[in-house]
Amino acid sequence: MTTTNETRKRLLLKDTRNLALWTGGWVMTMAIANFGPTFLWDHHTGLTITAILVNLGVGAGMILANIRHLKVLDEMQRKVAMDAMGISLGVAVVAGLAYSNLDITNIISYDAEISHLVILIGLTYLASTIMGNLRYK
Amino acid sequence: MKNRIKVLRAERDMTQADLADATFVSRQTINAIEKGKFDPSLPLAFKIARLFDRSIEEVFQDGA
């Protein structure tokens, strides 16, 4: 029995590392697709499309790695992760649309950037995960 | 939900880690269940009860 749970723990470690690698790869390919046209290949359309397609492919890999990671978690760990995802989704929709309204109505002087929303989602997920883990401590 | 896991564990000189290993969950999950902070799923509750050779009602009581 111990061996089986040891296997689960090893799988969890492997899948967590795998998810970190895919996420790192996705961030890197995102940066290349974003900054490459200006700093690396002087707005060559073919290279830009290729970089975006590679980023999409790596993003799909990251999503699959996340699904695999969720499957290895035990039921309480999965509940913490799912709760954090639900809260992040809610915050993203509510805050994202409010932010968009601020931009559309010109209450804010700058354009509403999607990157701000991604940062907010990331921070919300992080805070929710920490709070979820503390709740069950 | 209240439970007698801590007592049953002590009777068998079992640690939280031992129980976690036997039920394929993390020690943190066993700790949360034991403290009544997390209600286990029915399959996990049955697994725990079976491990202690008790019925599910003998291990878990409705504390609501």
Image: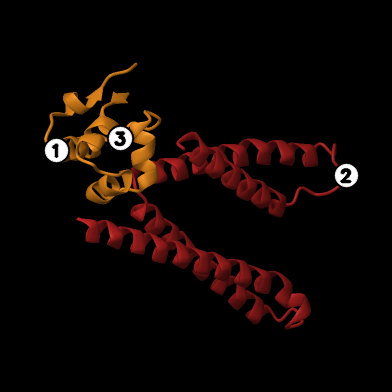
Chain colours: A red, B orange
Q: Earlier in the sequence, mark 3 or mark 1?
A: 3
Which residue matches tag 3? B40
State left or right for residue A116 relative to residue B2: right
Output the chain of dot 3. B
State left or right for residue A11 relative to residue B19: right
**Which of the two residues, A10 or A63, is positioned nearer the viewer here?**
A10
Residue type marked 3: Pro
Judging from the image, what secondary structure is the residue with disc 2 in? loop
Residue type marked 1: Arg
- Where residue A77 appears, x then y in whole percent? 41, 45
Output the chain of dot 2. A
Judging from the image, what secondary structure is the residue with disc 1 in? helix
Q: Report the residue at 40% width, 66% height from top.
A: A14
Q: CA distance from mark 3 to mark 1?
A: 14 Å
Which residue matches tag 2? A109
Q: How many numbered marks appear?
A: 3
Residues at badges 2 and 1 in contact (C-beta under 8 Å)? no
Using the rendered view, name the quadrant where residue B6 is placed: top left
- Quadrant containing the N terminus of chain A is bottom left
Which residue matches tag 1? B50
Using the rendered view, name the quadrant where residue A33 is placed: bottom right
Looking at this view, name the residue that lies furthest to the right: A109
